[in-house]
Image (cartoon, rainbow, N blue to C red):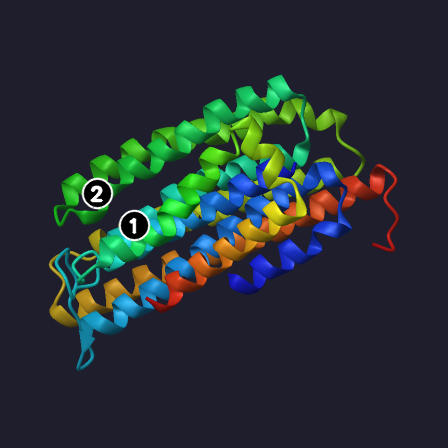
Amino acid sequence: MLACTVYTLVGQSRVLPKYRSALVMSSMVTFIAGYHYFRIFNSFNDSSAKNAIAVGTSQGTFNEAYRYVDWILTVPLLLVEVVAVLALAKEASKSMMSRLVPASAAMIILGYPGEISSNNGTKVIFGILSTIPFLYILYVLFVELGKSLDRQPEGVAATIGRLRLLLIATWGVYPISYLIPILVKNPSASQMASLFTDRQIGYTIADVLAKCVFGLTIFKIARMKSAAEGMSDAH
Amino acid sequence: MHMNNLRMWAYAMIATGLINWDYQRANHNAFAKSMAIVIPGLILFALTYVPTAKSFLITKAGRAITLIVGVFALAYAFIN
């Protein structure tokens, strides 16, 4: 994550100034996520002993719901990155952001009660509730944003199309990880530990894909658009 | 463009400070330590909307100060 931060920061001179704000946002997203992982490792270390980990909400336990703090700070920015790199007209950008940012915040806030609940019914209900804003985000990205793709340079529209698919694929890992604990009925202690680990791995893979790979794709789009607008490849 | 970058810089400080606080909430002085990261971020963010401060922030000295404050705040987030 931190390497990705440096890469997108250093790479700013390789794109036109109007696309740099998207790269700065990407850098901030990966930096915040990188710092968050640094703290996750500390927390994991403090709460584990003798191959067991104490999970909960009190001091000295590993609280995976903290991930939601990271997500609420970074996920809206990921969507703003997409709008920023397209360099749409001011009004269109504003309208898009005013819908995507609250929807992404709602998606995360609605997932939180399900995450901290040990009741499977609650998990499912909040999982479904948080899927509603997610579907709305997809609608805005595929239908509303799709209209602006005709005006994008050759090749860029295809890359943006792939970016949207990447978003679905990577964001799709989150609900799978979220639902892992309810896939096994009445798990034993060792199964619980294994499910917990699986979920952490799932969230971590999703975070790397959704933040680093997404950011690098944004960088690629910015490079393609800069080249299409006359920036030399020597940069 | 430059103001946006400064706002992102401020946002990084605020976010990092909040995460720092979240993870160490029960530790002694965690709030004060985290606020040492959050408050400079909040001040910088507010200043980017004040016309007189804006003109200072785009000078060489203004940029150097924001960079140094930010680097110290973010480094502190890792070591405290």
Q: In this view, does A200 lie above or below A223?
A: below
User: In the rendered structure, which amino acid carries the disc numbered 1?
Assistant: Tyr
Say which quarter of the image contains residue A83. Answer: top right
Q: Residue at x 56, y 57 (%)?
A: A5
Left or right, A72 with respect to A187, comes to: right
Q: Which residue is drawn at 53% across and 57% down?
A: B68
Left or right, A37 with respect to A123, comes to: right
Q: Is residue A46 above or below residue B75?
A: below
Left or right, A15 with respect to A232, comes to: left
Q: Which residue is drawn at 48% across and 23% down?
A: A98
Query: Which of B63/A28 is in front?
Result: B63
Pointer 1 chain: A
First-in-chain label (1 vs 2): 2
Is disc 1 in contact with disc 2, using a CB cutoff of under 8 Å? yes
Outermost residue, bottom side: A50
- Crowding around mark 2 (Cα neighbors within 10 Å: few <14, some 14 to 19, many 20+) is many
Query: Which of A22/B30 is in front?
Result: B30
Q: Is residue A227 above or below residue B31?
A: above
Say which quarter of the image contains residue B55. Answer: top right
- Crowding around mark 1 (Cα neighbors within 10 Å: few <14, some 14 to 19, many 20+) is some
Label annotation for residue A204: none
User: In the rendered structure, which amino acid carries the disc numbered 2?
Assistant: Gly
Q: Position of residue A8 (x, y in %)?
A: 63, 54
Q: Where is residue B23 in the image (x, y as percent from the top left)?
A: 26, 58
Label annotation for residue A178: 1
Label 2 sits on a secondary structure element that is helix
Q: Position of residue B77 (x, y in %)?
A: 38, 61
Label 1 sits on a secondary structure element that is helix
Where does the C terminus of chain A fall, quadrant-wise? bottom right
Pointer 2 chain: A
Quickly name the residue at label 2: A114
Q: Position of residue A120 (x, y in %)?
A: 16, 46
